[in-house]
Amino acid sequence: MKLLFDFFPVIAFFLTYKITGNMFVATGVIIVAVIAQTAWQWFRHRKVSQMALISGVLVLIFGGLTLLVHDKAFIQWKVSVVNWLFAVAFLASRCFGDKLLIERMMGENVQLDPPVWRTLNWAWIVFFTALGFINLYIVYNFSEEVWVNFKLFGMLGLTVVFAIAQAMWLSSKMPPEEAPPQSEKPQ
């Protein structure tokens, strides 16, 4: 359910575009959806996640510019800017604090050696950087409708594939679980 909630603005944007065929109407809807999502998080938990806040602010800025200037490039570039900011956050985490960002996110559930955390952190940096460039490639080499489909299905698909690959790689790096001692059976 949380995944659906996290993707609510993107799904609202996608459905609005599919129904109206109008990028500017869809942009207005994603702005309203982000505001509603943020308000819901605040009223429900009395806090808003940092990732949702960053993404929401960027939707407001780039979506607002899209509507103000009437140029869809702003909302299309927002996707790349968000991904690059995430890459920068993972990169900057190397300089601040005693744990990398990925370790802060996953460290309670996964025990890994420091070199594995560093490799995993770099993998996310590369992934977010590449995703930003892939988005721009789609924006400038394909139709608006292809980009809208990519924004929902392509980005989500690539993220799922990356997460599965990460899980498979991590499973090979996990320390072996200790088997519980077996009691001797009487004969």
Image: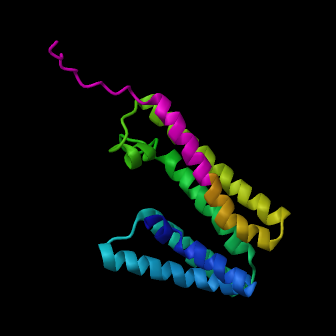
The image quarter containing residue 1 is bottom left
Q: Farthest front residue?
A: 187
Q: Residue 2 colored magenta?
A: no
Classify residue 97 as left or right of residue 86. left
- Residue 101 vs residue 18, the one in the foreground: 18
Residue at x 62% of width, y 44% of height: 126
Q: Is residue 76 left or right of residue 170?
A: right
Q: Residue 168: horizontal and vertical position, in percent?
A: 53, 37
Picture quarter containing residue 123? top right
Residue at coordinates 45% horizontally, 45% vertically from top-left? 102
Report x, y in % for residue 128. 61, 51
Between 16 and 66, which is closer to the camera in this rendering?
A: 16
> Where does the image place residue 180, in percent across and percent down from the top left?
25, 25
At which x and y percent is residue 116? 47, 31
Which segment is the magenta one? 159-187
Q: From the viewer's perspective, is residue 154 above or below residue 15?
A: above
Q: Quadrant of residue 15?
A: bottom right
- Membership of 160 in magenta stretch: yes
Q: How is the image coloured?
A: rainbow
What residue is shown at x 35% (from left), y 76% (from top)? 42
Determine the residue positioned at 58% across, 52% down: 160
